Image: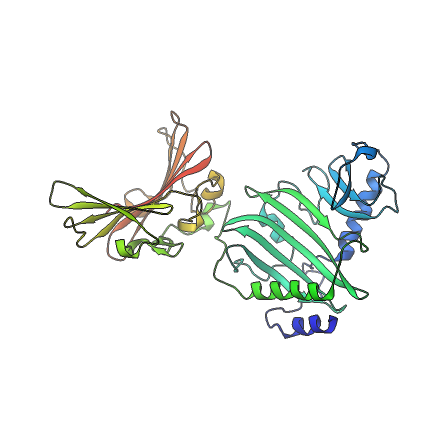
């Protein structure tokens, strides 16, 4: 079985072995994680746990031993130099870091500290493989992202290596909430309590291999330096399988509930409500003749809009997906983010102190000479409304 894993690794063209260079960022190994455990254990042994070991919490990870800034899950009820440790959890921003990454680091900070052979994080909406490589010992090293669309929930790096007739999996997981690391967990530290059957190790490798070949979904580029980003353009009008300029009532997804509204000027509006969205068309008659899209609103947090925006996003997160930073805030609490207002493309931010709302507006021209505006409305720092509308 070990030979099979090695053959799989050698056969994968996308899994190039990293050059043996001091300048190359190396994959995470079990040895590196064991060294982290030894350093942290040596430091905390000088003190006493914060919890009562006699009544300490026990679960499938072992007995919880809480020290300042770090939790040990151990076999037994005391921590000594010889106590088997099953897992470590760090939850303090000022203590302990792996490769300079700790609590409150961004996903970009994490990705920069480890190998990454998949810069666009191409994969599925649920995840992506960052690297996957066979090792000379007969196992493999890997890195992967777990996500819900553009929302990264965890970044994991590990090594699966032979241990007799079994395999040991040692891994570090950076849990992410609102684009910040909120916990760092290290598993597989106790070789006697983390062994995998060879068949399971091979299955895990196969799953990663399959995911590494996916490119149906990619990460949207983020930048704290807004001038590095491109302006909102017509390419952004195609999202979640939807082409806004080409939308027609019959091309809307799922079942829709339609309502015709007489404009009293010889034209009609058709309002179509579907699962998680509302689309409005302008028509020439009450039968929907020559329908043209007028607006599209996203009503739930499942569907993603342009550049992956979703209801519930944090303001700073979405601002970092669009070009910004060319101008200063005016006295009327508006800021021209880029371009010249009235001449597409341009972006504008406005703040309403009365309602405590921030609105980000981005306008682009279309190939037929029209203009489309994306409005993102934030209340209490969270995205509450996403709407595209034809303005010309």
Furthest residue to the top? 354
Residue at 74 percent across and 70 percent down: it is 2
Q: Nearer the viewer, residue 349 or 143?
A: 143
The image shows a total of numbered marks equal to 0
Vertical comparison of 15 with 180: above or below: below
Residue 315 is situated, as x and y percent measured from the top left of the image, at 46, 38
Instruction: Locate the N terminus and report the quarter of the image it occupies.
Output: bottom right
* Residue 283 appears left or right of 87: left
Residue 120 is situated, as x and y percent measured from the top left of the image, at 52, 58
Residue at 20 percent across and 48 percent down: it is 282
Is residue 18 among what the camera can see?
Answer: no
Vertical comparison of 35 with 139: above or below: above
Q: Nearer the viewer, residue 64 or 351?
A: 64
Indicate how the structure is coloured in the image. Answer: rainbow
Answer with the quarter of the image where residue 374 lies. Answer: top left
Residue 314 is situated, as x and y percent measured from the top left of the image, at 48, 39
* Residue 328 appears left or right of 342: right
Residue at 30 percent across and 42 percent down: it is 341
Q: Nearer the viewer, residue 84 or 150?
A: 84
Residue at 70 percent across and 37 percent down: it is 94
Is residue 247 among what the camera can see?
Answer: yes
Residue 262 is situated, as x and y percent measured from the top left of the image, at 16, 42
């Amino acid at each position: 079985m070990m030979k099979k894993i090695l053959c799989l690794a050698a056969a994968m063209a996308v899994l190039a072995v990293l050059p043996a260079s001091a300048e190359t960022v190396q994959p995470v190994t079990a040895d590196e994680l064991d060294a982290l455990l030894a350093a942290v254990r040596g430091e905390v042994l000088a003190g006493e746990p914060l919890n009562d070991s006699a009544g300490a919490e026990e679960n499938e990870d072992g007995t919880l031993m809480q020290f300042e800034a770090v939790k040990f899950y151990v076999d037994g009820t005391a921590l000594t130099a010889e106590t088997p440790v099953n897992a470590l959890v760090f939850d303090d921003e000022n203590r302990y870091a792996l490769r300079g990454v700790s609590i409150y680091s961004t996903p970009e900070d994490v990705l920069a500290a480890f190998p990454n052979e998949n810069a666009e994080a191409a994969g599925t909406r649920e995840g992506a493989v960052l690297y996957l490589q066979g090792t000379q010992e007969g196992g493999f090293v890997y890195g992967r992202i777990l996500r819900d669309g553009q929302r990264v929930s965890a970044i994991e790096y590990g090594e699966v290596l032979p241990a007799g007739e079994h395999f040991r999996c040692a891994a570090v997981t950076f849990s992410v909430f609102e684009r910040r690391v909120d916990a760092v967990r290290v598993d597989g530290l106790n070789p006697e309590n983390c062994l995998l059957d060879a068949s399971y190790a091979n299955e895990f490798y196969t799953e990663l291999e399959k995911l590494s070949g996916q490119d149906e979904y990619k990460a949207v580029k983020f930048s704290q330096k807004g001038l590095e980003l491109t302006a909102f353009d017509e390419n952004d009008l195609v999202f979640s399988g939807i082409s806004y300029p080409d939308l027609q009532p019959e091309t809307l997804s799922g079942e829709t509930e339609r309502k015709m509204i007489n404009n009293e000027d010889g034209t009609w509006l058709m309002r179509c409500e579907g699962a998680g969205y509302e689309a409005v068309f302008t028509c020439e008659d009450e039968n929907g003749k020559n329908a043209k899209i007028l607006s599209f609103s996203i009503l739930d947090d499942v569907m993603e809009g342009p550049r992956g925006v979703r209801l519930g996003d944090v303001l700073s997160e979405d601002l970092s997906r669009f070009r910004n930073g060319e101008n200063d805030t005016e006295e009327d609490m508006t800021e021209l983010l880029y371009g010249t207002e009235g001449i597409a493309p341009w972006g504008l931010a406005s703040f309403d102190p009365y309602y405590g709302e921030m609105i980000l507006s981005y306008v682009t021209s279309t190939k037929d000479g029209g203009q489309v505006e994306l409005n993102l409305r934030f209340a209490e720092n969270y995205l509450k409304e996403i709407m595209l509308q034809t303005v010309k």
